Amino acid sequence: MHKPGTATPERFPAQDRLAAGAQYIAGRPAKGTSGRTHAVVDPATGEDVYTYELAGAEDVDAAVAAATEAFPGWAGATPGERSDALHRFAAVLAERAEDFARAESLQCGKPLKLTREFDVPGTVDNTAFFAGAARHLQGQSAGEYSGDHTSYVRREPIGVIGSIAPWNYPLQMAAWKILPAIAAGNTVVLKPAELTPLTSLLFARAATDAGIPDGVVNIVTGTGREAGEHLVGHPGVAMTSFTGSTAVGRRVAEIATATVKRLHLELGGKAPFVVFDDADLEAAVNGAVAGALINTGQDCTAATRAYVQRPLYEEFVRRTAALMETVRLGDPFAPGTDLGPLISHAQRDRVAGFVDRARAYARVVTGGEAPQGELKNGAYYLPTLVADAAQDSEIVQSEIFGPVLVVLPFDTDDEGIRLANDTPYGLAASAWSRDVYRANRATREIRAGCVWINDHIPIISEMPHGGYKSSGFGKDMSAYSFEEYTQIKHVMFDNTAVARKDWHRTIFGDR
């Protein structure tokens, strides 16, 4: 049974739209059938704001059936028809921007200025981008490559896509999963994180209100062990797209490959932030604090390892710590708040554990504790700078997913790039230099799916996002994402009208 929770209408204006349940199947909201409930918790206060029935295997089956039924009609729509529907979808999202921003801030603890200025407009822009991209699903141009035949390439939708999105950017990740898939003519069953289903459900409702046919976008909200694994292993699902930790990604891969599914994985990160000795130090310090603390550090591309060439090292540490101490923690809905809480008290305690263990081998320059006073009931943690850790230490090698930046010195350019590459991850990185040759070398030699120069974090709909190494494979956003969500078919026409082809002699007869 749905319980409204403690959120006021001002903080959660779209609450009534979710009263019918946290599943969205065949264009209608529904309650989960697992027999268990789950509460969405406001991490800023620790209070329950929305309690719902979790999805079970039967709900996943129903969602896959709805997506399967909708697939022929949606796949058979013209690119222009799908494009028009997505343009309407973008317009509905823009009209409801404030509802989305407040729901995202409520369930995640993000400052409202972040959801209003980053999460929601980025999602609207992504939708508008794929509305245009839906008309550009070209293959290789036709040609007579054998001499006797004309060949061309078709891009065709795969079928039902089973997607799993994480809790750190619930709205944006839902969009990244759903939009390229449906623009290419697929249908989708998305499982959001059970901690943060609110904006995914509102997103699916907006798709229906924009005229996207029932069953094209479906949401099942349940646990990973029950709903998630059943979705990944479902025989009616043709492809799995997963964003989350590398450890869980390995489990997803095991299940998906057992049924020979297409697989797209966007996994963990440990982004290096390499500052050469000719860098603009003020720009690098500002970039490090912003890049490390965005979304309270719960970002797989966040700056987590700053490598600073020795002449700038001590000054970088001093100035970065001083700037971190000016960041204002507070109520995500208050206009003066810069940084909200972590997603949960469990995540805060996990982050604190990394820092507390690091005290034995490194220097905690600032932060390193949870604030008290009026913030003590929330999952807050102070912006934290750790210096002088060893490269092979836990805090340098492991993904922390919190407001923690580790700073290490390096001497030569070779060493800086070597250290940047010295983790299992390869999702994103940045390099800071005013020397074009140094910068170009960094873009070539740092093994990551995105390398920024003199900035860290910005993303745009037109460019791909995805990693190297243990950060997974495949691309979100951009036209490159269609390579994940389409089948490539070679079509070959005989041009000779000859019944007995010359090559037939290899099977019977002579020339």
Image (cartoon, rainbow, N blue to C red):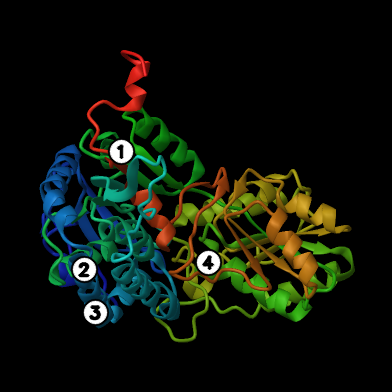
The numbered mark, 2 or 1, whose residue comes first in the sequence reads 2
In the displayed structure image, the side of residue 247 where residue 142 appears, left or right: left
Q: Is residue 262 above or below residue 447?
A: above
Which residue occupies the foreground of this view, 471 or 314? Answer: 471
The numbered mark, 2 or 3, whose residue comes first in the sequence reads 2
Q: How far apart, in angstroms, are the residues tagged by discs 1 and 4?
A: 30 Å
Residue type at mark 2: give it: Gly
Q: How far apart, in angstroms, are the residues tagged by discs 3 and 4?
A: 30 Å
The numbered mark, 1 or 4, whose residue comes first in the sequence reads 1
Residue type at mark 1: give it: Val
The numbered mark, 3 or 4, whose residue comes first in the sequence reads 3
Q: Is residue 323 above or below residue 484?
A: below
Where does label 3 land, which residue?
91
Which quadrant holds the C terminus?
Answer: top left
Where does label 2 land, which residue?
80
Circle 4 crowding by C-alpha within 10 Å: few under 14, some 14–19, many from 20? many
